[in-house]
């Protein structure tokens, strides 16, 4: 009976023990004085980033295992690659048409040792056509205020939170995760949940 009580106590305390091991300046940085109104995690990424491509599976796993009240979002940055700024808007178009997963899968599959073979809007149109979005749908979304707003927000957020590398994870618009301090996906998951509960 005593062993069962001890085991139960250890189980109950383990989340607090794990949380106590996360330290500001080591596992995360505070980049904003005020947190978002609701808990969220934003992954800043680029289609030019091999590490972002490799992180796709982990990101999907993390999103699936987050508490229901924590939103997981993605934000493309413009500072990588010759066509980075245009890809921010293209990602916004994909999001507005609810084909961001299909779009990301195709674009990441094109990433090679010499970067991305995307040099023009025609190249983007071909990608959208390959996932079932015709030119009229693309043009309508690309010219919309919704896409313009999303594009502006992604660019402003990257500047506001001083995002300089990808992938980067921002929690509650306040805590920027130091990914180099993390050794496992489980540890990262614990850190993200811990930070999402912080004010």
Image (tube, rainbow, N blue to C red):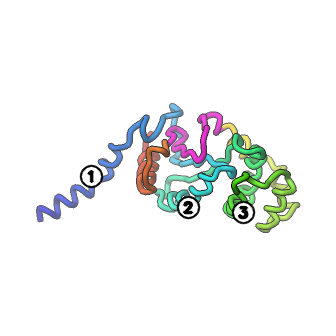
Q: Work out whether residue 98 can be spotted.
A: no
Secondary structure, mark 3, is helix
Q: Which residue is mark 3?
A: 106
Q: Which residue is mark 2?
A: 57
* Vertical relation: 101 (above or below) 118: below
Assess disc 1: are there few (<14), some (14-19) or many (≥20) residues with their C-alpha within 10 Å of its C-alpha. Answer: few
- Observer-nearest residue: 125 or 34? 125
Q: Residue at x 54, y 48 (%)?
A: 41
Q: Residue at x 60, y 38 (%)?
A: 163
Secondary structure, mark 2, is helix
Q: Is residue 193 left or right of residue 154?
A: left
Assess disc 2: are there few (<14), some (14-19) or many (≥20) residues with their C-alpha within 10 Å of its C-alpha. Answer: few
Q: Residue at x 68, y 44 (%)?
A: 77
Give the x, y percent position of residue 47. 69, 52
Q: Which residues are magenta?
A: 157-177
Nearer-N-terminus badge (1/2)? 1
Q: Which residue is mark 1?
A: 13
């Amino acid at each position: 009976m005593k062993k069962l009580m001890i085991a139960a106590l250890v189980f109950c305390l383990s989340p607090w023990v794990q949380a106590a091991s996360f330290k500001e300046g080591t596992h995360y940085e505070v980049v904003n004085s005020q947190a978002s109104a609701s808990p969220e995690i934003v992954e800043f990424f680029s289609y030019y980033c091999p590490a972002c491509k490799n992180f796709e599976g982990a990101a999907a796993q993390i999103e699936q295992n987050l508490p229901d009240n924590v939103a997981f979002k993605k934000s493309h940055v413009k500072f990588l690659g010759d066509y980075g700024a245009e890809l921010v808007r293209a990602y916004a178009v994909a999001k507005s048409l609810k084909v961001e997963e299909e779009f990301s899968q195709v674009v990441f599959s094109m990433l090679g040792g010499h970067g991305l073979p995307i040099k023009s809007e025609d190249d983007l149109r071909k990608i959208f056509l390959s996932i079932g979005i015709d030119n009229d749908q693309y043009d309508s979304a690309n010219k919309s205020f919704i896409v313009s707003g999303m594009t502006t927000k992604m660019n402003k957020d990257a500047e506001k939170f001083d995002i300089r590398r990808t992938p980067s994870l921002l929690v509650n618009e306040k805590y920027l995760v130091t990914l180099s301090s993390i050794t496992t996906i489980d540890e990262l998951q614990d850190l993200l949940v811990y930070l999402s509960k912080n004010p």
